[in-house]
Each structure stands twice: as structure tokens, then as C-alpha cells.
Image (spheres, rainbow, N blue to C red):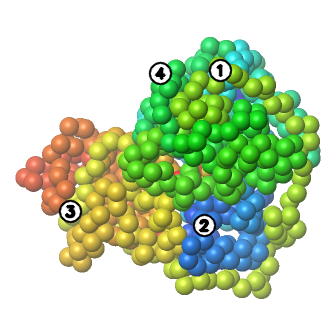
């Protein structure tokens, strides 16, 4: 029988399907070809992998990157790096040394392959969609399972086709495209979708531009975003010395999408995301002339050669305004080498930019926090309140073009006023893989290698089986769009990632610094802790610590108006039931500190997911839609406990 025409998403998923039927089932299991971890989530992922007792990784390629915790104040970061290096050597994982670059940029340059699946313990793993991969962000334990050869589960997707026509005007770039998509779809309500780009405008975008769009697709809350693999992709791979990795992958003629949104690239104008959400879109025109204190360029979103070279062209022969601080973090050594070779680096230094390490750095508030009340323009992908390290700062997300034009005057400027020439896609990238260790033993593993464990590396806590009922307390009540940065702050707290009891002290630090102590007191009394939240709870990162640390503090359920995909999966992986209100108005009936009862929780999880919660003399209904696999995990007390 002739199969129906398929889009790119459905082709890749069909080739990797190991469980479920897209026509019938709500959840699909897919085979994972490649995995990536970064250091801040990687230590936990590998501790969990170790506890699975598998001699070496079983997927095609596993890469462990070090890019988040690179500041090394105190011993913790360096100890983590040594731990990760020894784990990589022992289990057959490629290890990318600190200083090599940011995981997503590096993976695109050196390892990504069209048509393959990639699972990464970082929410911006969909960067790989720019090269035609189904690349998904997930919690560390899901990556550990994939490295052990297990399937990864996604909600059966709906596929939205984003049809691109026309060509971007001068001064506009890929960042403006994804900000347009965010303007249309926002940061919530997109759970379960995959966004696939198609149409004649696709060929006008080079691979780094496509990757900017799929990277920041994470802010939509979708499962992933993907571009076709065409001659532009081929040219990129050939220039990376990897022509053999190319396969053509385009949607069949007549392939259907569940929905289509069309963008005429020629009609776009420079956009920015205003504080404090990537979905809060305004035009640069509207903000023009606003005084700016800081401009940060780079991160995994806009740190390719194309992006930083463009900035250099804007700044050539000029100097940044005297009262603005400008910092640049390139995505990789390859990018730095190219900028050094063509004179861009000298231009940037001469223009008064601070050249930073090729690492996440400013994006995650690990350094370069702006001054009190500052306006900071940044080319990264998230502007959640306080993420920069300065709670009062107003962070706007912009394209490299807008950032560069504004750097010259210290005010928001329209980059179309004096646009620079487009940077052509390089014919040949300089290749230097020397900072990728253990490439030769990748996939094999070296049994005798000792794992190095510094004192900050603590064992992973395991959940316990779910009882019949809980007597509980509403430990906190929060509002809408609570991000994982609110739940489990990063920045200065990042160094505790490998030590759950130490890191758990900071759960909900920006919302309620007493949360930790209150939860432990409730736990002591044999009471379960419950989190009550509004819409889109758990937006943002893939960090499983936002579930693992609450689990450690005795949180057993979240009751929210809605919960985002990666966080929902992480909650289940750590035995916390992700409930939503049957009637959202009941949110108003719950208060922090209120005594709660969940009399039949086990029966509810085993059954249709509907549970009653007794609260202050009334009973409210909450629900959760669970697959059989998810029910099993919750009843066992989480994924790790289920493997025991
Ligand atoms: C982020 O951008 O928020 C992070 C830091 O990269 C996280 C991962 C983490 O918390 O370690 C992400 O995006 O998943
Ligand atoms: Fe790193 Fe920022 Fe990208 Fe997260 S979003 S991976 S912190 S550069």
C-alpha cells in the first residue's frame, strides 16, 4: 500500500517509533540516536546512569559538554568537571572540555545529523532542528535511560507548519522570525506541538539562522521545532568537513499539517521581547531611543560566526557608547578562531567590547549581572525576572543587529538605519576537535577507569512508593508562568547542582525563602507538601532539579491550572503527581499553609486520574491524564525507584 505523503516531523518519528501508534495513542516511544548533556544537568544524569548498572552507553553517540558552570569560584565546578571527564572515559562518552564552547552550537557544528533523533538534558536541545533533526530537551534521568538504550516518550504530536515566504529585509535576522512566532503563539498553550518550517523562504536562511529559530522555539513550550534538510544544510555540513552526514529530508508533496501559519519574511521588522517574558513582543521602532546600560551578545541563541561577524561589521572603525557596557560570548572555539582570522576580533576589542569565555555565562546569571534597575539588551533566549542575576534589571531580547546598532549610541536603535552587508555562509570552517576527548573510545567505555568524586558530589535521592492517601499542607501558592528559574534558581546557586540536600535549600528562593524550612518541618510531622500554581507552571528549562529537590523536601503533588511539558515529565520521573484543577476557579479556594487531604490518591492515579482534595471544609476535584507507563512511575515513587 502506498503511504500517505509525510512532513519532515512524521518521517523522522516514523523511522524511530518503538512504542505506540500515532493514529491511536496519546504517547509515543521513540528510539534516541544521539544524546547530549551539559555540566549543570549532566552530573545528576550520570549519577543516575551509573545507578542503572550498564557497562557503557548504548546509543550511537553520547556527548558530555561543559559550558554552564565554568566560573570556578571554589572547588565545586572543577570537581564536577573531573567527575564528568572520568564518567565519559569510563562509559564511552565524548567529553567536551570546558572552554570548547556552548553545547548547542558545538553539537550543530560537529555532531548533528539530519534525520537523526537527539535527546539533551537542556531545553535548548531543539537547536539541532536547524539541521533537520528531531532534537528534544528533557530531564537528566530521561537522558540516562536513552544512553542505556531505552526509549524516550513524547505526547503524540500535532504538527504546525510555519510557512516561510519572501526574504528578510536588511537589518532583520532569524531572531526577528522567532520573535514573530512567539508574538503569535506566546509562551504557553503549545504543549504537545512540533513546529515545522517549510516553504520557499526556508532556502534564504543559512543553518545558524535556522538553528536560532529552533533554539528559541523552546520558549514556546513546544516539544521541538524542525527545518528540512536541503542543499543549504548540505553546504553547511560539507563546509564542516562532514558532507557524508548529509541526507536530504524534505516534506513530501501534498504533506499535511495540523495547522499552518504563514510568515512573509520580507514584511518583518526588528522586534524585541520586553521584560519579563520571551513572549512579550514589542517593535524596536516603539522602543527606539530608550537609554540602555548594558548589551550582551552571544549565548546558545546568537553566537555563530554569522552573528558575531555581523556585530563586528556594525562596530568596524567605531567605538561603543561610553556609558554602555558591551560583552560578547562566542558559541565555540571555531567561531573565535574564524573571528580572529578575519580581523573581527580585533574590531570588537578596539570598539571596546568585553570578550567573554565561550560559555553560557551571562545568559544564566553566572556573571555580568547588570547594575540595579539597568536596561540590558541581550541576544539570548530568556529574560525571566532575575535570571540576569539582578532582580530589578529590565532585560530585552534582541537580534545581534539591534544589539550592535544600539551599542554605538547607548540607546535602542533600529538596525535598518545603517544595515551592514549579509555575511555569506563560509565555504570551509576551520576544524579542530582537540578539545573533544575520548572520541576514539566513544561508545566503548573503559571498565577500569576510576570515577573521580569531589566532596560536593552527593548521592541521588530515590523516591518511595505512593501510599493510599496523603495528609498534606499547601506549602506554597504561586501565580501564572512560574518558571524553573523561580522554582530552582541557577546563577550563583548553580554550583550545588551535584548535591541535592545543599541545592534544595534554595527551592523557591525568589518566591518564598522559607519554603525549604517549612517543607522539612511538614515532612518531619509526616505531612506531604503540595504546590499550588496558576497557568503554565514550570516554563523554561529542562532542569530536573526543579522536581528532584522538591521531591527531596517531601513534595508529593503539584496542583496547577496548567503545567509545561518538560517539567510535567520531570515531576512524574520523581514521583510527584502533576494535577490540574477540574475547575480553574478552585485555585482561588486554596491558600498557602492550608491543611489538605488527598484521601484516595493511589486509587486516582491507578484509575482515570481524577482525585478529590479536601481543603478548608470543601472538596475540590483535580485531574491528571496519565499513560500506563506514567502511572507505573508514580506508583513506584519515580523512575529511579521503578528500576530498583
Ligand atoms: C537554561 O537556559 O535555563 C539552562 C540553564 O540551560 C537550563 C538547563 C539547566 O538548568 O541546567 C535549560 O535550558 O534546560
Ligand atoms: Fe546556556 Fe543560556 Fe543556552 Fe541555557 S539558554 S544552554 S544557559 S546559553
As measured in the structure, the alpha-carbon distance from the residue carrying label 3 to the one carrying label 4 is: 47 Å
Q: How far is disc 1 from disc 3 in space, using C-alphas?
A: 55 Å
What residue would you read off at disc 2?
71
Task: Determine which quarter of the picture holds residue 547.
Answer: bottom left
Spot occupied by residue 27 in the image (x, y as percentages of width and height) = 53, 44
The disc, 1 or 3, on the residue closer to the chain's N-terminal end is 1
Q: Secondary structure at mark 3?
A: strand
Tell me the CA gap for discs 2 and 1: 36 Å
Left or right, 632 with respect to 517, comes to right
User: Can residue 526 be spotted in the picture?
Assistant: no
- Report the disc number at residue 416: 1
Residue 215 against residue 144 in the figure, above or below: above
Sequence-wise first label, 3 or 4 = 4
Mark 4 is surrounded, within 10 Å at the Cα level, by few (under 14), some (14 to 19) or many (20 or more) other residues, namely few
- x, y (%) of residue 550? 37, 65
* Residue at left offset 61%, top offset 83%: 453
Residue at the image position 72 percent from the left and 17 percent from the top:
167
Tell me the distance, in whole angstroms, between the alpha carbons under discs 2 and 4: 37 Å
Amino acid at each position: 500500500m502506498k503511504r500517505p505523503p509525510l512532513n519532515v516531523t512524521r518521517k523522522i518519528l516514523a523511522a524511530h517509533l518503538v512504542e505506540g501508534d500515532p493514529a491511536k495513542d496519546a504517547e509515543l516511544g521513540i528510539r534516541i540516536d544521539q544524546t547530549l548533556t551539559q555540566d549543570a544537568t549532566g552530573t545528576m544524569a550520570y549519577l543516575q546512569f551509573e545507578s542503572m548498572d550498564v557497562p557503557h552507553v548504548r546509543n550511537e553517540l553520547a556527548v558530555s559538554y561543559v559550558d554552564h558552570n565554568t566560573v570556578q569560584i571554589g572547588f565545586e565546578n572543577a570537581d564536577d568537571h573531573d567527575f564528568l571527564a572520568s564518567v565519559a572515559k569510563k562509559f564511552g562518552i565524548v567529553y567536551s572540555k570546558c572552554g570548547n564552547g556552548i553545547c548547542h552550537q558545538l553539537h550543530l557544528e560537529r555532531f548533528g545529523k539530519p534525520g537523526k533523533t537527539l535527546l539533551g538534558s537542556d531545553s535548548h536541545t531543539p537547536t539541532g532542528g536547524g539541521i533537520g533533526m528531531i532534537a528534544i530537551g528533557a530531564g537528566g534521568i530521561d537522558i540516562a535511560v536513552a544512553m542505556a538504550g531505552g526509549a524516550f516518550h513524547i505526547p503524540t504530536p500535532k504538527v504546525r507548519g510555519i510557512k516561510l515566504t519572501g526574504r528578510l529585509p536588511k537589518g532583520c535576522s532569524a531572531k526577528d522570525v522567532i520573535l514573530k512566532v512567539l508574538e503569535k503563539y506566546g509562551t504557553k498553550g503549545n504543549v504537545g506541538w512540533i513546529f515545522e518550517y517549510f516553504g520557499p523562504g526556508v532556502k534564504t536562511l543559512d543553518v545558524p539562522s535556522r538553528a536560532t529559530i529552533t533554539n528559541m522555539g523552546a520558549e514556546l513550550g513546544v516539544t521541538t521545532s524542525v527545518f528540512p534538510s536541503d542543499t543549504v544544510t548540505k553546504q553547511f555540513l560539507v563546509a564542516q568537513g562532514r558532507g557524508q552526514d548529509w541526507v536530504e529530508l524534505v516534506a513530501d508533496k501534498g504533506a499535511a499539517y495540523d495547522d499552518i501559519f504563514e510568515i512573509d519574511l520580507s514584511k518583518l521588522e526588528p522586534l524585541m521581547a520586553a521584560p519579563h517574558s520571551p513572549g512579550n513582543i514589542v517593535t524596536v521602532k516603539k522602543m527606539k531611543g530608550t537609554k540602555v546600560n548594558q548589551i550582551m551578545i552571544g549565548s546558545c541563541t546568537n553566537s555563530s560566526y554569522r552573528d558575531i561577524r555581523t556585530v563586528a561589521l556594525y562596530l568596524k572603525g567605531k567605538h561603543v557608547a561610553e556609558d554602555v557596557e558591551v560583552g560578547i560570548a562566542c558559541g565555540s572555539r571555531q567561531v573565535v578562531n574564524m573571528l580572529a582570522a578575519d580581523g573581527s576580533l580585533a574590531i570588537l576589542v578596539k570598539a571596546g567590547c568585553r570578550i567573554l569565555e565561550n560559555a553560557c555565562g551571562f545568559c544564566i546569571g553566572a556573571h555580568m549581572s547588570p547594575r540595579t534597575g539597568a536596561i540590558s539588551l541581550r541576544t539570548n533566549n530568556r529574560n525571566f525576572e532575575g535570571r540576569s542575576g539582578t532582580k530589578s534589571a529590565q532585560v530585552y531580547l534582541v537580534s545581534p543587529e539591534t544589539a550592535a546598532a544600539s551599542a554605538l549610541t547607548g540607546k535602542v536603535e533600529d538596525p535598518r538605519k545603517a544595515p551592514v552587508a549579509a555575511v555569506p555562509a563560509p565555504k570551509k570552517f576551520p576544524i579542530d576537535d582537540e578539545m573533544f576527548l575520548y572520541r576514539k573510545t566513544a561508545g566503548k567505555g573503559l571498565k577500569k577507569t576510576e570515577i573521580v568524586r569531589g566532596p560536593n558530589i552527593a548521592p541521588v535521592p530515590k523516591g518511595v512508593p505512593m501510599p493510599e492517601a496523603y495528609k498534606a499542607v499547601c506549602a506554597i501558592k504561586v501565580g501564572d508562568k512560574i518558571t524553573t528559574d523561580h522554582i530552582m534558581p541557577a546563577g550563583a546557586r548553580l554550583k550545588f547542582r551535584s548535591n541535592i540536600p545543599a541545592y534544595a535549600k534554595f527551592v523557591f528562593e525568589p518566591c518564598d525563602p522559607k519554603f525549604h524550612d517549612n517543607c522539612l518541618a511538614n515532612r518531619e510531622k509526616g505531612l506531604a507538601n503540595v504546590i499550588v500554581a496558576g497557568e503554565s507552571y514550570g516554563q523554561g528549562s529542562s532542569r530536573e532539579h526543579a522536581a528532584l529537590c522538591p521531591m527531596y523536601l517531601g513534595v508529593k503533588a503539584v496542583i496547577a491550572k496548567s503545567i509545561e511539558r518538560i517539567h510535567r515529565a520531570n515531576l512524574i520521573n520523581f514521583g510527584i503527581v502533576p494535577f490540574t484543577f477540574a475547575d480553574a476557579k478552585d485555585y482561588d479556594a486554596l491558600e498557602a499553609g492550608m491543611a489538605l487531604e488527598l484521601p484516595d490518591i493511589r486509587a486516582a492515579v491507578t484509575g482515570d486520574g481524577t482525585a478529590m482534595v479536601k481543603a478548608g471544609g470543601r472538596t475540590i476535584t483535580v485531574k491528571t491524564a496519565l499513560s500506563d507507563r506514567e502511572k507505573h512511575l508514580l506508583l513506584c515513587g519515580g523512575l529511579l525507584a521503578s528500576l530498583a
